[in-house]
């Protein structure tokens, strides 16, 4: 995994993973914005790696190489700590949006913000009636499920505008007076601090508007972009398998029923891995079937995660639920993080597309 990732040794990567996991344990016990974990990602070069080249990011030979590296990085961080993986995925999403939509002045501003080690998020989810741009060019409304609220440097938020499709606006995200984390009392993903953030009065002007109306919702990019959270989740599922294997006692290892259960878990996790890799590949190619393949991938990763949580409990027993056990934390994190918007709708849309054609092997690619 690490060869494509960053120019550093496997030993350094495994040390980084251990330090992130240890910090994750602390942030889980006393939920706070995980500033120390993000600092480690900056030091490892992961903060700027997927920024546009004009803002100091890496120049990739092609999109396939870039997306494969993104997938590795998301899986890697997800394996270490799913909350930090969630924050990192938001940052990577923001970097991609800047690359697609920013004008030269915004790219120069981004470069300076990254010099200051600012982290970014993307906040689309909102309580009714949603966020809008008022006639005086300021925002009205709030976001919820806003990961990193009050801790990130900036967020890219969606906002409705009269007579136009929704737009993206860059806002400061570090104003603790606007952040409300009181409702983020959750069994997992605690350090993602996905609270509420008030946006009233923040400017939506030439400097802060990113792209034009409807740019965020452009397909296949929008729906296929879900492959990224699948990659983070996959990292968590993979490490749950690894921790379960490490914790498996001799009695379970020598029992054929438990071994069959373990084999089922291996198959589920690896199958999810193949689908995530394919979804990333199709998204990189702007493939016309990237959308149904990602929609299917979401359900396959969700199923693998739920199966892995159950397998860990049945293979390890009560130990899987004890405070301080890594298996407990990953299971709690995954159980929440797997809840993403419209899962049944996504699977149904994929089924409709697949009934229409074989989306994996569209006819022109069969032979
Ligand atoms: C840890 C975490 C961090 C997050 N961070 C961010 C972030 O930074 N930015 C951001 O924009 N969002 C974020 N989100 C929100 C995320 O993108 C989803 O919007 C959210 O997880 C969906 O929550 P829900 O399952 O309660 O969905 P809801 O849409 O409220 O659905 C609730 C239930 O109703 C069902 N349901 C909904 N609609 C229908 C329907 N039409 N027909 C049948 N059943 C239906 C769903 O399947 C689900 O079971 C985050 C979520 C989590 C868990």
Image: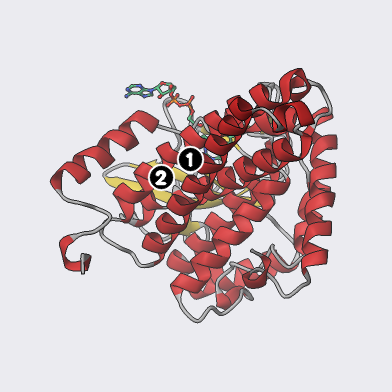
Vertical side of 281 occupied by 356: above or below? above
The quadrant in which residue 92 appears is: bottom right
Direction from residue 134 to residue 80 in the image, left or right: right
Residue 297: mark in rendering: 2
The quadrant in which residue 43 appears is: bottom right
Q: Residue 207: percent from the left, percent from the top?
A: 52, 62
Disc 2 residue crowd, few under 14, some 14–19, many 20+, Cα 10 Å: many
- The N terminus sits in image quarter: bottom right
What is the C-alpha distance between the residues marked 2 and 1?
A: 6 Å
Which residue is located at x 59 percent, y 68 percent?
Answer: 51
- Which one is nearer the viewer's eye here, 264 or 14? 264
Q: Are marks 2 and 1 in contact (CB under 8 Å)?
A: yes
Q: Residue 338: percent from the left, percent from the top?
A: 53, 33
- Which one is nearer the viewer's eye here, 153 or 60? 60
Vertical side of 23 occupied by 178: above or below? above
Q: Residue 273: percent from the left, percent from the top?
A: 51, 50
Ligand 1 closer than 8 Å to the CB at disc 1?
Answer: no
């Amino acid at each position: 995994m690490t060869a494509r990732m960053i120019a550093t040794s496997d030993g350094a990567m495994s040390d980084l993973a251990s330090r992130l996991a240890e910090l994750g344990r602390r942030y889980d016990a006393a939920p706070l914005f995980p500033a120390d974990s993000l600092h480690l990602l900056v030091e490892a070069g992961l903060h700027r790696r997927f920024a546009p080249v004009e803002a100091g990011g890496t120049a990739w030979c092609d999109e396939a190489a870039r997306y494969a590296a993104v997938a590795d990085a998301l899986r890697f961080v997800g394996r270490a700590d799913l909350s930090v993986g969630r924050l990192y995925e938001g940052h990577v999403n923001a970097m991609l949006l800047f690359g697609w939509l920013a004008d030269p002045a915004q790219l120069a501003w981004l470069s300076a913000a990254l010099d200051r080690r600012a982290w970014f998020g993307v906040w689309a989810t909102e309580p009714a009636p949603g966020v809008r741009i008022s006639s005086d060019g300021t925002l009205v409304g709030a976001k919820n499920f806003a990961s990193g609220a009050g801790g990130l440097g900036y967020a890219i938020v969606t906002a409705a505008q009269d007579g136009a499709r929704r737009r993206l606006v860059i806002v400061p995200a570090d104003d603790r007076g606007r952040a409300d984390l009181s409702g983020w009392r959750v069994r997992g993903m605690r350090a993602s601090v996905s609270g509420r953030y008030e946006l009233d009065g923040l400017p939506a002007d030439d400097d802060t508007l990113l792209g034009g109306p409807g740019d965020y919702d452009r397909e296949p990019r929008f729906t296929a972009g879900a492959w990224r959270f699948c990659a983070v989740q996959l990292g968590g599922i993979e490490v749950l398998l690894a921790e379960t294997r490490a914790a498996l006692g001799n009695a379970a290892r020598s029992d054929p029923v438990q071994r069959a259960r373990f084999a089922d878990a291996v198959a589920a996790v690896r199958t999810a891995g193949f689908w995530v890799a394919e979804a990333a590949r199709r998204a990189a190619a702007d493939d016309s079937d990237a959308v149904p393949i990602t929609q299917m991938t979401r359900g396959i990763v969700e199923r693998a995660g739920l199966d892995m949580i159950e397998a860990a409990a049945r293979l390890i027993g009560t130990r899987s639920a004890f405070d301080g056990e890594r298996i407990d934390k990953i299971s709690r994190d995954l159980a929440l993080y797997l809840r993403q918007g419209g899962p049944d709708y996504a699977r149904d849309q994929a089924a409709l597309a697949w009934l229409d054609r074989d989306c994996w092997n569209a006819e022109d690619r069969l032979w």
